């Protein structure tokens, strides 16, 4: 294989199409209106700073993502948090593949929370869109997106972008560029042409018989600068990507060596238990610390605007001491929000007046106004949800020597560093972030409220402070998935298929395509209301796809019933123009043994749903059993997914399973209610999650279509609530249009 890999046919087609409109518009703005300026500025590099921060004795930093030791060991430095998704392993696979490295020599390392490691690959992938950046724009585009990433302090993990964007945009380039540099160093040393050198498993070979390991040319490779664009391997040449590699993070988590923020130990450390005002917008009026200070191990009690904290020599002592105090709060004027009132107002606002347009195509209004139109209308709603990650939020903060050190897990560590500087009144250079493991997050650790609280406490104490939120504080002061409601309407033709669909819903967040109707339809519209959610909003796993998946796929199932057709076959008929989606739907039907099960003499209570999100197409079938007491059980779930390419199939399947469990927990039990402005639920006894004994057997089938690579961490969640509700209908004849299902009254399986 020569140094320049052959590109894919899709890439060639993209090159013929030219640059995306986003690239030209945003790139032009960032470059002052002219790409010629960018050409003059390329290459733009932070390599000196990167080498200073991640350099090691006897090793050489080729880029911000690659360090090679003299013995040939390769360290992959990646700019993401791992929330249990194994993204570090998959990112290393992508880099090692393009580098042609020996997988046994690979290790991973988290990138520092520094501007030098701002993640330009995210911006690059977004600007590129579905097109390949032309060669003459490659340098300017990289410079533009690098500048944008630095301006935005971008090092975020979320939106299932780690593999689909950082991996396929950044890590592929980092691996190919390292290979380029090593090959040229060897060619110069051996006096041969680069094209004559072959690379396999971390070694360089020449037909003359010469060969060497990466480590032998690591230092010499530093004199070579790769071009802004390199051709990548075709997928049929992959030997690392697409293989089920063992995750790097698993051993330490199994043997207890993994360090989370609560595990951090610094000399003189105190543990802080916090109590925050139970109503948003409220403040602490006063608190008498005496009952806490008299307890064993308690060192101090401190206050800040929205609450107080008790510090002790271990967390249990600080928590029980905080429980002994009786604070007085000042609440905002008014009764405070009530979640039932909020949902009722959302539903009332869906009548059509004042709705904002989301998207539309075709003669929707005309078809609803036609004489004799057969109109089906349904209303659905979904509640507020907490993130309820196994590790509650918290971090360690220590002011000393004129600066601030922080130990913690952040979904945007670079953003957290700048936020910490702002909270502390320091320059960013005076703040140092130490990464810890993350015990789940699902969007919760994008917000830096707990970091602000830790800093407010630590600045009043001459010692490191380990702030750990109790489950109650974490759940009652979350940034919640918003409550939502939807009014779905359709006109059915003589064949039972919809000729028009109108979708009105409350609260629009991210991503923009979440509300899109995924089936073949020439007349469809979506409109929304906003501003009706008074609770603190936060990105929750799959964001708007989680609510829209429930609304749209529940409605499609009801349309199938109205048409007297099988739910799977009905959907299949609506996907005639989308063979990729149809293949996913067919796969899950095959896995579950669907085959007209709803009309068989012995019924199996199955529900089906399909959702495309974050570039990955997923169809799921849930099996339901309903006991005589009305309790809903889910013995089995089948998942068929097409991510285009599964970098680590085992890791991808794990994320599908994780998404199902998370989504089932929410659909069955999840609900945060508010009374008088305060969250009612506080712990797993009143906000249950699916326990191991009740978890279904999950089977995953991966369809690798070769299309653009999609995400893994979030796409498994959106279909499951609708598939579950549809299965409950199959089992009981009762439609559930309001989540969670635990509120519904259903009877035994039919």
Image: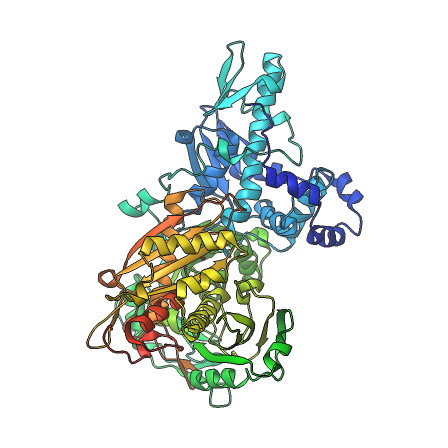
In the displayed structure image, the side of residue 253 where residue 367 appears, left or right:
right
- Count of marks, rendered view: 0
Identify whether 66 is placed above or below 23: above
Q: Residue reaching furthest bottom? A: 334
| Quadrant occupied by the C terminus | bottom left
Q: Residue at x 69, y 54 (%)?
A: 22
Q: Is residue 464 visible?
A: no
Q: Position of residue 331 (x, y in %)?
A: 47, 85
Q: Residue reaching furthest top? A: 208
Q: Closer to the camera, 447 or 556? A: 556
Q: Closer to the camera, 337 or 308? A: 337
Q: Residue at x 36, y 70 (%)?
A: 726
Q: Is residue 196 visible?
A: yes
Q: Closer to the camera, 634 or 159? A: 634
Identify whether 342 is placed above or below 653: below
Identify whether 253 is placed above or below 449: above
Identify whether 112 is placed above or below 659: above
In the displayed structure image, the side of residue 131 where residue 203 appears, left or right:
left
Q: Residue at x 53, y 73 (%)?
A: 493
């Amino acid at each position: 294989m020569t140094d320049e890999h052959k590109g894919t046919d899709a890439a060639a087609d993209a090159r013929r199409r030219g640059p995306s409109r986003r690239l030209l518009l945003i790139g032009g703005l960032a470059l002052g209106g002219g790409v010629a300026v960018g050409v003059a500025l390329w290459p733009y590099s932070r390599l000196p700073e990167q080498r200073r921060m991640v350099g090691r004795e006897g090793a050489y930093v080729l880029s911000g993502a690659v360090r090679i030791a003299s013995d040939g060991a390769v360290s992959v430095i990646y700019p993401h948090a791992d929330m249990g998704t194994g993204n570090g392993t998959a990112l290393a696979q992508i880099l090692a593949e393009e580098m042609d490295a020996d997988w046994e020599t690979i290790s991973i390392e988290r990138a520092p929370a520094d501007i030098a490691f701002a993640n330009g690959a995210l911006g690059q992938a977004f600007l590129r869109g579905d097109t390949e950046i032309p060669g003459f724009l490659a340098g300017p585009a990289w410079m533009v997106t690098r500048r944008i990433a630095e301006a935005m302090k971008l090092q975020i993990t979320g939106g299932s972008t780690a593999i689909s964007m950082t991996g396929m945009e950044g890590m592929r380039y980092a691996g190919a560029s390292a290979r380029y540099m090593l090959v040229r160093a060897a060619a110069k040393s051996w006096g041969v042409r680069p094209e004559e050198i072959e690379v396999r498993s971390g070694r360089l070979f020449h037909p003359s018989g010469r060969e060497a390991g990466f480590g032998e040319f690591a230092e010499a490779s530093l004199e070579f600068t790769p071009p802004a664009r390199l051709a990548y391997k075709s997928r049929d040449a992959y030997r690392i990507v697409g293989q089920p590699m063992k995750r790097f993070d698993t051993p330490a988590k199994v043997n207890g060596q993994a360090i989370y923020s609560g595990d951090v130990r610094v000399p003189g450390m105190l543990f802080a238990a916090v109590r925050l005002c139970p109503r948003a917008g409220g403040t602490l009026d006063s608190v008498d610390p005496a009952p806490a200070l008299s307890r064993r191990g308690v060192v101090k009690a401190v206050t800040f605007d929205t609450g107080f904290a008790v510090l002790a020599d271990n967390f249990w002592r600080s928590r029980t001491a905080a429980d002994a105090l009786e604070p007085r709060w000042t609440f905002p004027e008014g009764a405070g929000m009530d979640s039932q009132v909020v949902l009722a107002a959302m539903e009332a606002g869906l009548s059509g007046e004042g709705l904002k347009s989301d998207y539309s195509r075709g003669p929707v209004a005309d078809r609803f106004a036609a004489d004799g139109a057969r109109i089906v209308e349904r209303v659905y709603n979904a509640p507020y949800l907490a993130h309820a990650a196994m590790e509650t939020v918290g971090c360690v903060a220590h002011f000393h020597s004129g600066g601030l050190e922080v130990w913690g897990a952040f979904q945007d560590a670079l953003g957290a560093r700048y936020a910490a500087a702002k909270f502390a009144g320091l320059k960013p250079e005076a703040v140092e972030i130490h990464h810890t493991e993350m015990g789940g997050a699902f969007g919760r650790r994008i917000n830096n409220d707990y970091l602000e609280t830790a800093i407010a406490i630590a600045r009043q104490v001459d010692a490191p402070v380990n702030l750990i939120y109790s489950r109650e504080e974490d759940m009652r002061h979350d940034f919640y998935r918003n409550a939502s409601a939807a009014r779905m309407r359709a006109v059915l033709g003589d064949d039972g298929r919809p000729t028009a669909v109108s979708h009105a819903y409350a609260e629009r967040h991210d991503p923009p395509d979440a509300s899109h109707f995924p089936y073949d339809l020439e007349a469809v519209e979506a409109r929304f209301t906003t501003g009706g959610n008074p609770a603190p909003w936060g990105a929750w796993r799959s964001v708007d796809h989680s609510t829209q998946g429930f609304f749209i796929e529940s409605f499609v199932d009801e349309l199938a019933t109205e048409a007297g057709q099988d739910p799977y076959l009905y959907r299949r008929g609506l996907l005639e123009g989308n063979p990729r989606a149809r293949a996913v739907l067919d796969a899950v039907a095959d896995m579950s043994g669907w085959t007209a099960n709803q009309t068989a003499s012995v019924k199996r209570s199955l529900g089906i749903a399909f959702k495309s999100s974050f570039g990955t197409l997923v169809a799921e079938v849930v099996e339901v059993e309903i006991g005589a007491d009305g309790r809903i059980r889910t013995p089995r779930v089948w998942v068929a997914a097409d991510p285009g390419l599964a970098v680590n199939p085992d890791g991808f399947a794990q994320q599908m399973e994780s998404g199902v469990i998370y989504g089932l927990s929410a659909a069955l039990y999840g609900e945060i209610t508010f009374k008088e402005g305060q969250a009612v639920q506080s712990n797993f006894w009143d906000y249950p999650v699916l326990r191991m004994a009740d978890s279904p057997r999950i089977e995953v089938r991966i369809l690798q279509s070769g299309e653009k690579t999609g995400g893994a961490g979030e796409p498994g969640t959106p279909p499951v609530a609708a598939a579950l509700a549809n299965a409950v209908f199959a089992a009981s004849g009762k439609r559930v249009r309001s989540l969670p299902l635990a509120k519904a009254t259903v009877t035994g399986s039919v």
